[in-house]
Image (tube, rainbow, N blue to C red):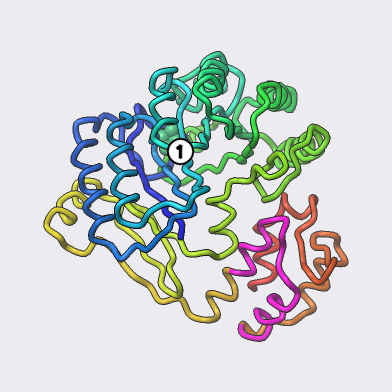
Amino acid sequence: MNAYLHIPFCASICSYCDFTSFAGRESQMAAYVDALCVEIRDSSLRGPLQTVYFGGGTPSLLAPERLGQVLGTLQKKAGFAEDVEISMEANPETVEGERLRAYRSLGINRLSFGAQAAQKEILRRLGRGHEWERVEKAFHDARKAGLDNLNLDLMFGLPGQTLEMFRESLEKAVGLSPEHLSLYALQVEEGTPLARQVAEGLALPSEDLIADEYAWAQGFLARRGFPQYEVSNFAREGKACRHNWNVWRGEDYWGFGVSAVGTVGSVRHSHGDDLMEYIRQVNARQDVLAEEYLTEDTRAWEKLMLGLRTQDGVEKAEADRFIQTAGRTRARFNRLLQEGFLSLNGGRYRVTSKGYFVLNGILEVLDA
Ligand code: SF4
C-alpha cells in the first residue's frame, strides 16, 4: 500500500498553477493537519506502507512537528515497511539546515525541490518565490542534513525561455548531482493568471522549440547517466521515485486531504477541494470521500495508459486484453509501430523517445 497526502498551502500562488493550493492560510494549518490525522485514523487504510508522498501545495511550509504528527498517525494506523520511501515536495526558499535535519530525523528520506529554471526573469514571471542561488543552498543544506535522494523539478516551454536558457538550467541542475530530475512542459490552464496573460498577448514558445528542448534534454540526460524512465522523469540507476512508480504500475494507493485521489482495488476515491469544508466534514465525522467503481474496461485502459508512460511499457498480452475489452483494432498499434512512436521488444510495447513528446496524441489514437 502507498499513501499520498495533499498539503494545500503555498506562500503565494504561481501564475500557471491550477493545483489545489491556498496562500495566506497559515492560520488553518494546525486545523488541517488535525483533520488529516482524523481522516487517516478513521479510514480503513492497511499497511505496511511501502511509500508515503507529501505533495501540494508546498508541504515544506509545514513545521516538522506537524509532519511528525501525520507520520506518527500513519505509523500507528498502518505501519511502515522497513525500506519505506517517504517523499516530500519542497520549495527551496522554505527550507534551511535545521528544518531539513528535523525532516530527516522524522524519516523523510526523499525530497523533491521545485527549482523550475535558473534565470531570475523566468522565475519572476512564473511567480516563483526563489532565485537559483536559493536552489543551490537548499540542495547543499539537504545533503548536509543526510538526505541522499534528491529530485529537482524543471520546466520548459516557458514564456521568454530560449533553448539556451533551458540548457543552462538543466546543466546547472545536473551540476548539483541530484539522484533524479523531473521535466515538465508548461501547460496553460484555464482560469490561471497565466491564461489571462496569454489571452492579452503574452507570447508562448513555438511547438518546434518545445520539441527541441525536450529532445535535447533526453539526449543530454542519457549521456549524463540519467536514463528516462517515464515521460517526465529521469533518474540515476535505482533512484526512480518509488511512490510514482508504484502508482503507474497499478498498485493500490490511498489519498488523504483536500483534492487527493486514491485507488484501492476497483474503487477510486476522491476528495473535494474546499479546505474549510474538508476540515468541517472530517471533524463532524462525515464522509469526505466520493467513490467510483472502476469497470473492467476502465481498468484495462488505465493499465495500458499508465504502462505506456513508463519505460516498462505494457505486456503485449495486456494490450491484447485492452483491444478485446474495449473493442479496438490491432491496426492502431501497428500504425504507431510503423511510424516509430511505439516499439515491440521482448513481448512488450513501449513508447519510443520520439513518441514520448506526443504521448497524449498516441493515447488518443489508441483510445479513439
Ligand atoms: S508552488 Fe506549486 S502548488 Fe504552490 S502555487 Fe506554485 S505551482 Fe502551485
Location of residue 77 in the rendering, given as x and y in whole percent from the top left corner: 30, 56
What span is colored magenta in the figure? Answer: 303-325
The answer to whether 141 appears left or right of 163 in the picture is left
The answer to whether 29 appears left or right of 243 in the picture is left
Please name whichever residue, 263 or 200, is drawn nearer the observer in this view of the structure: 263
Magenta stretch, main secondary structure, is helix
- Quadrant for residue 299, please give it: bottom right
Q: How busy is the neighbourhood of tag 1: few (under 14 within 10 Å), some, or many (20 plus)?
A: many
The answer to whether 290 appears left or right of 162 in the picture is left
- Is residue 216 one of those drawn in magenta? no
- Res. 229 in view: yes
Q: Which residue is drawn at 51% across and 23% down?
A: 142
Location of residue 357 in the rendering, given as x and y in whole percent from the top left corner: 72, 49
Give amino acid for label 1.
Met
Q: 239 above or below 301?
A: above
Q: Residue at x 73, y 45 (%)?
A: 228
Please name whichever residue, 120 or 223, is drawn nearer the observer in this view of the structure: 223
Q: 78 above or below 111?
A: below
- Furthest residue to the front? 82
- Res. 196 in view: no
- Residue linked to disc 1: 88
- Furthest residue to the right? 338
Q: Quadrant of ligand 1?
A: top left
Location of residue 350 in the rendering, given as x and y in whole percent from the top left corner: 76, 62
- Is residue 320 one of those drawn in magenta? yes
- Furthest residue to the left? 284
Check mark 1 vs ligand 1: CB closer than 8 Å? yes or no: no
Q: Is mark 1 on a helix, strand or loop?
A: strand
Q: Residue at x 15, y 60 (%)?
A: 285
Q: In which quarter of the image is the C terminus?
A: bottom right
